[in-house]
Image (spheres, grey):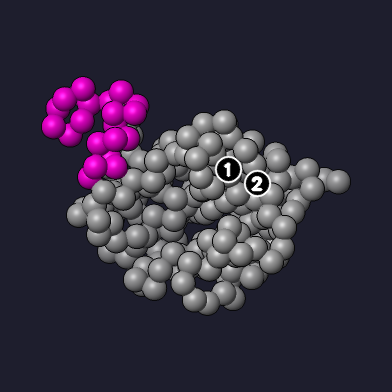
């Protein structure tokens, strides 16, 4: 069996309402959270990589400058993550699978993404999710059938329902012996991220 073609979609069009400002471009290590996630996809050797950005926000539309990443704008992100996923699916093109990444989870590194892709590629099941010590969480990997099902899905949180809560098709769970990467939604989450990484806080404290 030939190696499958696997692309990546990075969702970055959310409004960041709980953060109170655009969280995806907050500083992280020597760059930003969104570029760290893009780097994880590129470092895992998969592609094409697509960044889904909100309208009228040059900071995110230009977030992939200098990287081999396509940027697509979701004209109405208020429709939810599924609308951004559909934008990404249209742009990523014909691939055997897609890794779905969130731009506010910068602790997902290239090694984690590569291991998820390798585990899925052995049997190429309907989808794969990551299982950490404490929880099932992103990133997810979707096969062609899963991509097609989600493109036609309706209702609230169809991705989570289809892959985690009530899967109708067996979904591979790839185990990682670590805590789940932080999902940065609030200022407190961001401070925790910086503390976990030993980085200075926004207040200047280390």
Q: Residue at x 34, y 45 (%)?
A: 184
Q: Which residue lies under the disc numbered 1?
A: 131
Label 1: how many Cα within 10 Å (few below 14, some 14–19, many 20+): many
Direction from residue 122 to residue 117 in the image, left or right = left
Q: Is residue 147 above or below residue 61?
A: below
Q: Residue at x 59, y 69 (%)?
A: 150
Looking at marks 1 and 2 on the same chain, the residue that comes earlier in the sequence is marked by 1
Direction from residue 127 to residue 13 in the image, left or right = left
Foreground residue among 75 and 200:
200
Residue 200 forms part of the magenta stretch: yes
Alpha carbon distance from label 1 to label 2: 6 Å
Q: Secondary structure at mark 1?
A: strand
Direction from residue 180 to residue 120 in the image, left or right = right
Find residue 181 and report its horizontal and vertical position in percent.
Answer: 44, 39
Q: Quadrant of the C terminus?
A: top left
Label 2: how many Cα within 10 Å (few below 14, some 14–19, many 20+): some
Q: Number of marks in the image?
A: 2
The circle drawn on residue 30 is: none
Stretch of the chain drawn in magenta:
187-206
Foreground residue among 101 and 67:
101
> To which quarter of the image does residue 16 belong?
bottom left
Find residue 82 and report its horizontal and vertical position in percent.
Answer: 48, 68
Q: Secondary structure at mark 2?
A: strand
Disc 1 vs disc 2: Cβ atoms closer than 8 Å?
A: yes
Q: Which residue lies under the disc numbered 2?
A: 173
Q: Residue at x 61, y 64 (%)?
A: 166
Find residue 146 and report its horizontal and vertical position in percent.
Answer: 66, 63
Residue 92 forms part of the magenta stretch: no
Find residue 128 and report its horizontal and vertical position in percent.
Answer: 65, 50
């Amino acid at each position: 069996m030939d190696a499958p073609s696997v692309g990546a979609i990075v969702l970055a069009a959310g409004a960041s309402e709980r953060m109170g400002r655009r969280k995806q471009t907050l500083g992280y290590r020597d760059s930003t959270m969104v570029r760290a996630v893009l780097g994880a996809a590129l470092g895992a050797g998969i592609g094409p990589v697509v960044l889904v950005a909100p309208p009228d926000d040059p900071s995110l539309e230009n977030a992939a400058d200098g990287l081999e990443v396509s940027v697509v704008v979701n004209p109405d992100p208020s429709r939810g993550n599924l609308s951004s996923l559909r934008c990404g699916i249209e742009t990523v093109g014909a691939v055997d699978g897609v890794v779905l990444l969130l731009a506010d989870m910068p602790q997902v590194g290239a090694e984690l993404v590569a291991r998820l892709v390798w585990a899925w590629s052995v049997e190429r099941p309907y989808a794969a999710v990551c299982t950490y010590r404490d929880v099932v969480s992103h990133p997810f990997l979707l096969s062609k059938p899963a991509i097609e099902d989600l493109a036609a899905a309706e209702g609230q949180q169809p991705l989570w329902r289809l892959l985690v809560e009530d899967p109708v098709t067996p979904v591979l769970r790839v185990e990682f012996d670590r805590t789940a990467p932080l999902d940065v939604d609030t200022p407190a989450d961001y401070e925790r991220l910086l503390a976990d990484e030993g980085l200075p806080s926004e207040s200047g404290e280390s």
